[in-house]
Amino acid sequence: MPPPLLRGVLVCAAALLGSCLVPAAVHSQGQPAPSKATASKVLYTLATQCSLAGGPAQPCTVEAIDEGGTTIYRHRIGAQTIAVRITDSPVTMAIQSGTSTTWVPLRSAGALFSTNSICFNGRELCVVNPNYLNSVREDRQDLRLQGRDLVKVHFGPDGRVNATCYDAGCEADLR
């Protein structure tokens, strides 16, 4: 995994592995796209497998783009493009589909270590990324991950983390 990933992908890990907060109602609201004044830099490109809407895995390409305090993960699955945006301060996550210019805050994101997959908004978009998840396990050798398979976060209307859960705890009603 390339070192620049620490700012972007490990920010996602921080969101996925953060402490529990008081859950709040989740609503979708559009957010404007980040300013184009910041120079974009491609951090890496990954050929892997993705699935959409719980469907079968299919080849996809993930391109990680550094835009200053924001990292964009552009997923190309066939003719479809879906982007996930992670901001650093505060940590927020949003999704953008197709040709839309509107970012919609994510409702949830989860990492399932047994399948090396990261999913957004339930199973709306899932990406297989064993390198990333193995590095999360290596970087986070504290008790929070030992023996765990599923780590999930729920986001508020502004895309910020409202609750984190692990394994069977993710089945709890968070309303």
Image (spheres, grey):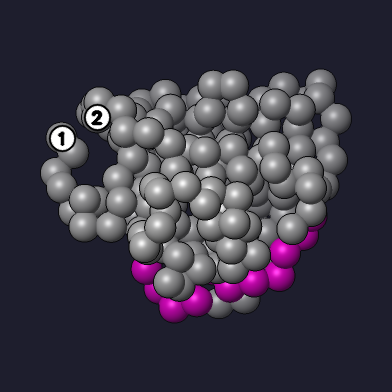
Q: Is residue 17 above or below residue 110?
A: above
Place of residue 128 in the rendered image (x, y in percent of width and height, measured from the top left): 55, 68
Q: Which residue is mark 2?
A: 23
Regarding mark 2 in the picture, which secondary structure is present there? loop
Place of residue 24 in the rendered image (x, y in percent of width and height, measured from the top left): 24, 26
Q: Is residue 60 above or below residue 32?
A: below
Contact (Cβ within 8 Å) of mark 1 with mark 2? yes
| Quadrant in the rendering for residue 87 | top right
Q: Nearer the viewer, residue 116 or 122?
A: 116
Residue 134 visible in the current orientation: yes
Q: Amino acid at mark 1?
A: Arg
Can residue 55 be found in the magenta stretch? yes
Can residue 150 be found in the magenta stretch? no
Q: Nearer the viewer, residue 125 or 108?
A: 108
Q: Which residues are magenta?
A: 44-57
Residue 82 visible in the current orientation: no
Residue beneath the point at 50% across and 76% down: 57
Q: Work out which quarter of the rendered image holds the N terminus and state it.
A: bottom right
Residue beneath the point at 48% across and 38% down: 15
| Quadrant in the rendering for residue 27 | top left
Residue at mark 1 to residue at mark 2: CA–CA distance: 7 Å
Q: Amino acid at mark 2?
A: Pro
Q: Residues within 10 Å of mark 1 (few under 14, many from 20)?
A: few
Q: Earlier in the sequence, mark 1 or mark 2?
A: 2
In-image side of 158 versus 69 (left or right): left
Q: Which residue is mark 1?
A: 175
Place of residue 88 in the rendered image (x, y in percent of width and height, measured from the top left): 61, 28
In-image side of 76 versus 108 (left or right): right
In-image side of 158 versus 89 (left or right): left
Q: Nearer the viewer, residue 85 or 174?
A: 174
Q: Work out which quarter of the rendered image holds the C terminus and state it.
A: top left
Q: Is residue 91 above or below residue 146?
A: above
